[in-house]
Amino acid sequence: DGGITQSPKYLFRKEGQNVTLSCEQNLNHDAMYWYRQDPGQGLRLIYYSQIVNDFQKGDIAEGYSVSREKKESFPLTVTSAQKNPTAFYLCASSQGVREKLFFGSGTQLSVL
Amino acid sequence: GESVGLHLPTLSVQEGDNSIINCAYSNSASDYFIWYKQESGKGPQFIIDIRSNMDKRQGQRVTVLLNKTVKHLSLQIAATQPGDSAVYFCAEIPLGGSYIPTFGRGTSLIVHP
């Protein structure tokens, strides 16, 4: 089946620890995105990548890092600099710019 | 400090009724609009989209209406079913700039059997 796979579904972070969320797509999409969702809030853009080996900061990039070494993969690292990381993280992809986004099933990150 | 937006706007309907979910968008340069449905603990799913050269588009049991004059978008769901219970988001994509979608806070639809 074609789609976007996020893992793990649940992740726990200890204070001072970096954690990495995985996002893989087999849709052959050029663009990939990371959003953060807090309860009762809309989706806020963390980072996006419109092509391999290039990515741009979104509205809330501080405390996060990404890489785009392969077209199908766009991992997100939540660093220790992110002081309030508890949230639901969503990865998405689109064929190109100004195209509809397809989302993964999300990763719930919590702090121990 | 002020608590911000912990409670989504909510629409409660009876099974079989028609539902109308509204969305006001902010950017007059936006020319592509998308509705998503998000069930609890899952990622958003695409429902229907519309470009600014249209003012109405129909899908299966859903219709999207676009009023560019007042920057308003609505999603109509016919014969609402309990399985339609979810949070519904609209997204706008601007013509120009980064072309990145901006999402609204969403509306929680509750369908009572």
Image: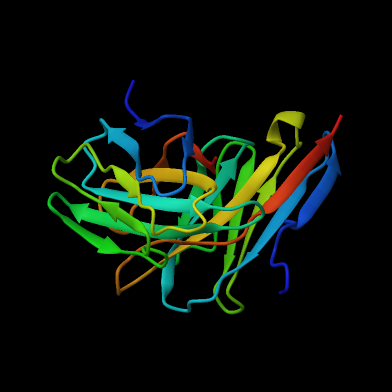
Image quadrant for the C terminus of chain B?
top right
Q: Residue at x 38, y 45 (%)?
A: A17
**Position of B70 relative to A101 (above/below):** below
Residue B53 in view (yes/no): no
Report which quarter residue B82 is drawn in: top right
- Answer left or right for A73 relative to B92: left
Name the outermost residue toward the top.
Answer: A1
- Answer left or right for A39 relative to A27: right
Residue B56 point in image, percent of width and height: 56, 57
Q: Residue at x 62, y 60 (%)?
A: B105
Image quadrant for the N terminus of chain B?
bottom right
In depth, the one of B18 and A86 nearer the eye is A86
Residue A85 in view (yes/no): yes
Q: Residue at x 45, y 66 (%)?
A: B52
**Position of B8 relative to B71 (above/below):** above
- Answer left or right for B61 relative to A2: right
Report which quarter residue A46 is drawn in: bottom left
- Answer left or right for A54 relative to B100: left
